[in-house]
Every structure is written in structure tokens, then in C-alpha cells.
Image: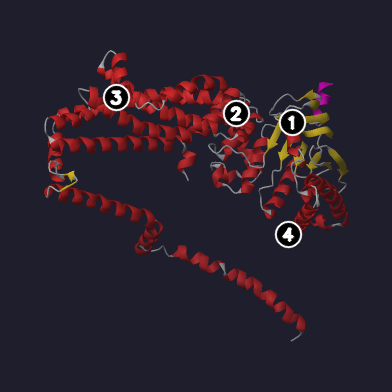
């Protein structure tokens, strides 16, 4: 054997190694993985969320159990559970309430107030924030007034609202509006202030004029913060609505809860509270869902 | 007469008696002073210089984002008054619109010009095909690698058919291998389109490899220190970076910039810092060659 052959030998074997490598990579798809392996893989990929869900369910059940024990044994330890309704009592009052059209009327009226108040806040707050973010003069004129009014809690507006508006209904919607308006405005403004100036430049040297830049750059760039504002605004809208209903309402879920206390229907107090919680959660989820639809580039992450 | 004019290559950039200063509490600060540059139609010209010398400022003035304090910027004899689609720009940070898909990004300039949707869609598809990006037209920029993003950035800037292309350290954020590929892609596009290019970079190898001519700027306040023609023949190959001609150009430019960088830093301690930089640059260029 001559030395050139020896030298060539490793080179010859190189393609063999290169060809051998893809073979195992091709084999797996030939036999589709069994249901068991797929399930195991799915479990491994989703272990985190599954764990969180499991713990969440356990923690909710534990909460109910503690509530049940505290009320059954009428524990008095600084806090008095003597008159607090048990979960079972609340469940009983829930089954009664779902057959009662009056309860639904309360819920629907609250939802309608939220819808009108919140929509008005979004319709006014978002464009105002966009315009204030874009035009310095508008910002300079409106911002000081907004900053003075913003820290006033919506509840503090109740007496003023009753004076301002001819009907109770209008003043409650007004208070709901005020509660959600400022978070929406402030977050929209914040979003506008964070728009990357390089993106504006990029649009400009592609021939975009003021109006197009506003529509194609400033608005979509601010959308994530606008939706943060809408989510926060929705939360504050419920807070304000319930307070307003408790003080000056005749209908609505807040009024229902307060009335239950006056009528010594303690189970209904908890039912009202839970209804408020569920409605608040539901409306936040709605906004989050809308955000995902409007911003596909973010939801695909 | 007009037909003859139209067939001539366009994109003659001229910057005359240019200076630009910012106002500050201590008075005006000179960023760029007494600068003349020009780019002939169809020419590829780079500007290099120590960091902070005002090369990006100069480019932004050509783009129309900054107004010169004195002097004038013209393109084909017309004074530059503001940004326009005639001067396409590519940014270091890619600056693609994250809320638009790759194709919508490329379409943007055509949309601004009022081209109907179906027409601009097919135009964008064709351009993306040329850049080898047709498979990604529906992706959002976030999903792309840096090199792909910048390819979209270049295609987007070229989609409106600008007279000149301005690039502000476009490959600065890319890794060495990707940068080499991008340089090749840019060269190919430039040769096919016969467009004038003004290219700002701090990478000397890149400037020599790509350009017909290189301007070297002084430390702040920036002005033109030297104008170096690059007589390397085209098409250029990566292997040319080892040729004695290339290395001689490189050595020359390097010492010019080193001088200015030292001036900008001042003092002996900083000279040691420069030695560190030198080593890094050597290692970098070696990586390119291999």
C-alpha cells in the first residue's frame, strides 16, 4: 500500500459519514409516533401552564373550604364571621337568583352603564391622547387641567354629578365615564411618547406625509399602550360604577349588593360581590381578546 | 431633449460649504464644519471616520432630516428641503414597522404614492423574490433574523425607485458572516439598479470592499480629511481582501482614522485603548477572510 492511498483514505470515508448522518433524521417520520409518546410530548411542552392551572384550581377549592369552615363554626377572631353567609348559602341564593328576572335586570343595567360610560371614555380618551401626543400646543393646553382633575376619585364626583345631570342614570354613567377616562388618556399619551422616532423617519423617507404618519406609525405604535389603558380603565369603570350605584342608584348590581345588606339578606351580599367580580373579569377578558385581534403582530409571539 | 435627460443616470448628490451646529447652553456646538462632498450618478461612495465625527449627521442632512446651518445639499441640482421618497434610507436599527408584515413593509412607499393595492402587492412580491424573501412575505419582522430584516429594509428603500440610496451603518448590528453576505447582496443590487449610494460605516474593510470612493472625516467637529479613490476592479471577490492593493488601502485609511480617533480622545492613556481596538480590528478582518 502506498502512502498516497493512506492519505486519501480518510477523505474517501468523509462522504460516507456525511451520508450516514441524515439517515436517522429521516427514519422517525416513517413510523408515526404512538398516541402515548405524543401525549407525553404534549405534557412536557405544556408542563408549566398545566401546573399553574392545577395549582389554581386547588387554591380556589382551598379558599372555598376555608370560607366554609370559618362560617360553619362562626369563628370570631378579631373579624366576626357570625353573620357571614356560608358558600352553600350563597349557592342557594344563586340558584334562586338565576330564576329571578329582577336579578338579571340589575346585572343588565350595570352592564349597560359600563358599556355607555366606558365606550364614551374610549371614544373621547383615545383620540384626545393621540392628538395631545402629536401636537404640543394641545398637550400644553389640556394637560394641566387633566392633571388637576385626574387624582379626584370618581366617587368624590357623586354629589357634583347629581347636581350636573338631570337624571340619576346619567350621573351614574358620567361617573363611570370619569373613572375610565383618565387611565385611557394617560396610557394613550404614554404610548405616543414612546413611539420610536426612527420609525417616523423611515416613514418620511418613504414619502409619508403628516396624516399618513399619524395613521400608519403613531397609531399602531401606540396601540399596545392604548389597550393597557383600556384594560385599566375598564377596572376603574367597575369600581366607580359600583360606588355610584351604592350611593345614588335604584337598580344595578352595586345597588343589589347594598340593598341586600339593608334587607338583611346576607347571602345576597356575597352573591352580588361575586357577580361584580365575574363581570369585571369577563369585561377585562373581552378587551384582551379585542387587543389580540387588533394587534396580530403581538399575539403571534 | 427631455428624453435624453431621462435616459441619463440620476442621483448626483452635492454637498457644498456644509456646516451644522447644535444650540446648547454653552453656545452653538459645531458637529460638522466646512464640508464638501459629492456622489456622481451611479457611484458608490462611503464615509468613514472616528465615532462621533458627524458622519451620520451629514447623511441625515442629505436625507433631509437635518437642515444645514450653512451651505447647501442638492440632488440633481434640486435643493434638499426635507425627507422624500427620492432619497431612500436604510437604518442601522432596521426600523421596519413591527405591525406590518414583510410585504406590507415593502409596499409602504408605493402605498404612500397612491398605487392601487393589487399593483403594489405584486410589485412587492417581485422585489421580495429578487431578495430571496418571498417565503417570508406574510411574516412579521420580529420573526426574522437580523440579516433578513436588513434585506427587507433595503428592498423597502428601493421599492419606490429612489434616485439615491443612503445607508447609515446598515450592517453594524450584524455578525461578521452575515455582514459579508449582505455586502455582496448590496453590491449586486447596486450594480443592477445603477443607483447612487452614500454609505456611512465605521468598518474600514467594508468601506474599501464596497466603494468607488471613500471620504475620511476628521474628529469632531467633522470635516473631510481625505478623499480616497478605490481603484479595485469589479466584480470584487472576498479574496481581494488579502491582496496587497487592498491591504495598502486599508493601512492608509487605518492610519488616517487612528490619527483622528487619537485626536478625539487625546492623551497617552487613550493610546493604549487604541491599541486594544487595533487588535480587535485585526481579528475581525481575519475572521472575514477565513
Question: In front of the other: label 1 or label 2?
Answer: 1
Q: CA distance from mark 4 to mark 1?
A: 34 Å
Q: Secondary structure at mark 4?
A: helix
Tags 1 and 2 touching, CB below 8 Å: no
Tags 2 and 4 touching, CB below 8 Å: no
Label drawn at residue B287: 4
Q: Which residue is mark 3?
A: A113
Image location (x, y in percent) of residue B190? 75, 41
Question: In front of the other: label 4 or label 1?
Answer: 1
Tags 4 and 1 touching, CB below 8 Å: no
User: Furthest-top residue in view?
Assistant: A166
Task: Give the mark nearest the N terminus, 2 or 4.
Answer: 2
Q: CA distance from mark 1 to mark 3?
A: 54 Å
Label drawn at residue B61: 1
Asked if residue B163 is positioned above or below residue A20 in the image, the reply reads above
The answer to whether tags 1 and 3 share a subunit is no
Amino acid at each position: 500500500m502506498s502512502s498516497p492511498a493512506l492519505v486519501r483514505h480518510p477523505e474517501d470515508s468523509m462522504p460516507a459519514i456525511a451520508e450516514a448522518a441524515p439517515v436517522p433524521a429521516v427514519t422517525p417520520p416513517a413510523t408515526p409516533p404512538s398516541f402515548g409518546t405524543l401525549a407525553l410530548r404534549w405534557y412536557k411542552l405544556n408542563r408549566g401552564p398545566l401546573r399553574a392551572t392545577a395549582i389554581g384550581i386547588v387554591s380556589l377549592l382551598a379558599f372555598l373550604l376555608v370560607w366554609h369552615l370559618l362560617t360553619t363554626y362562626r369563628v370570631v377572631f378579631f373579624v366576626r364571621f357570625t353573620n357571614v353567609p356560608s358558600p352553600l348559602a350563597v349557592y342557594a341564593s344563586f340558584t334562586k337568583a338565576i330564576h329571578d328576572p329582577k336579578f338579571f335586570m340589575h346585572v343588565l343595567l350595570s352592564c349597560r352603564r359600563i358599556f355607555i360610560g366606558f365606550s364614551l371614555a374610549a371614544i373621547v380618551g383615545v383620540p384626545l391622547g393621540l392628538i395631545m401626543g402629536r401636537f404640543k400646543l394641545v398637550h400644553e393646553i389640556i394637560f394641566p387641567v387633566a392633571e388637576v382633575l385626574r387624582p379626584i376619585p370618581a366617587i368624590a364626583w357623586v354629589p357634583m354629578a347629581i347636581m350636573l345631570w338631570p337624571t340619576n342614570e346619567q350621573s351614574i354613567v358620567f361617573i363611570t365615564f370619569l373613572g375610565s377616562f383618565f387611565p385611557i388618556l394617560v396610557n394613550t399619551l404614554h404610548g405616543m411618547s414612546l413611539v420610536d422616532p426612527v420609525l417616523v423617519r423611515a416613514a418620511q423617507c418613504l414619502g409619508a406625509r403628516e396624516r399618513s404618519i399619524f395613521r400608519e406609525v403613531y397609531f399602531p405604535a401606540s396601540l399596545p399602550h392604548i389597550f393597557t389603558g383600556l384594560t385599566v380603565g375598564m377596572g376603574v369603570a367597575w369600581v366607580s360604577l359600583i360606588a355610584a350605584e351604592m350611593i345614588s342608584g335604584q337598580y344595578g348590581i352595586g345597588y343589589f349588593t347594598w340593598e341586600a345588606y339593608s334587607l338583611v339578606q346576607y347571602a345576597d351580599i356575597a352573591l352580588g360581590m361575586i357577580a361584580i367580580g365575574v363581570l369585571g373579569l369577563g369585561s377585562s377578558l373581552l378587551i384582551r381578546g379585542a387587543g389580540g385581534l387588533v394587534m396580530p403582530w403581538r399575539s403571534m409571539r | 431633449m427631455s428624453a435624453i435627460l431621462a435616459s441619463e443616470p440620476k442621483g448626483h448628490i452635492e454637498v457644498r460649504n456644509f456646516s451644522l451646529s447644535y444650540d446648547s447652553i454653552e453656545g452653538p456646538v459645531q458637529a460638522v464644519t466646512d464640508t464638501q462632498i459629492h456622489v456622481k450618478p451611479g457611484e458608490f461612495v462611503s464615509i468613514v471616520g472616528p465615532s462621533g465625527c458627524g458622519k451620520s449627521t451629514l447623511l441625515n442632512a442629505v436625507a433631509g432630516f437635518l437642515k444645514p446651518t450653512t451651505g447647501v445639499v442638492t440632488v440633481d441640482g434640486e435643493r434638499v428641503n426635507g425627507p422624500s421618497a427620492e432619497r431612500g434610507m436604510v437604518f442601522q436599527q432596521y426600523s421596519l414597522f413591527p405591525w406590518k408584515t414583510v410585504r406590507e413593509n415593502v409596499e409602504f412607499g408605493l402605498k404612500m404614492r397612491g398605487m392601487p393595492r393589487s399593483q403594489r402587492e405584486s410589485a412587492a412580491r417581485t422585489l421580495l423574490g429578487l431578495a430571496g424573501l418571498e417565503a417570508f412575505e406574510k411574516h412579521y419582522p420580529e420573526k426574522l433574523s437580523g440579516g433578513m430584516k436588513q434585506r427587507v429594509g433595503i428592498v423597502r428603500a428601493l421599492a419606490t425607485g429612489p434616485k439615491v440610496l443612503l445607508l447609515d451603518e446598515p450592517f453594524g448590528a450584524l455578525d461578521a458572516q452575515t455582514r459579508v453576505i449582505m455586502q455582496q447582496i448590496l453590491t449586486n443590487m447596486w450594480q443592477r439598479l445603477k443607483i447612487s449610494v452614500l454609505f456611512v460605516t465605521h468598518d474600514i474593510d467594508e468601506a474599501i470592499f464596497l466603494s468607488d470612493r471613500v471620504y475620511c472625516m476628521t474628529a469632531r467637529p467633522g470635516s473631510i480629511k481625505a478623499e480616497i479613490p478605490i481603484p479595485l476592479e469589479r466584480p470584487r471577490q472576498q479574496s481581494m481582501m488579502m491582496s496587497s492593493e487592498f491591504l495598502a488601502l486599508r493601512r492608509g485609511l487605518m492610519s488616517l482614522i487612528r490619527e483622528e480617533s487619537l485626536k478625539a480622545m487625546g492623551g497617552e492613556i487613550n493610546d493604549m485603548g487604541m491599541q486594544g481596538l487595533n487588535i480587535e480590528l485585526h481579528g475581525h478582518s481575519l475572521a472575514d477572510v477565513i
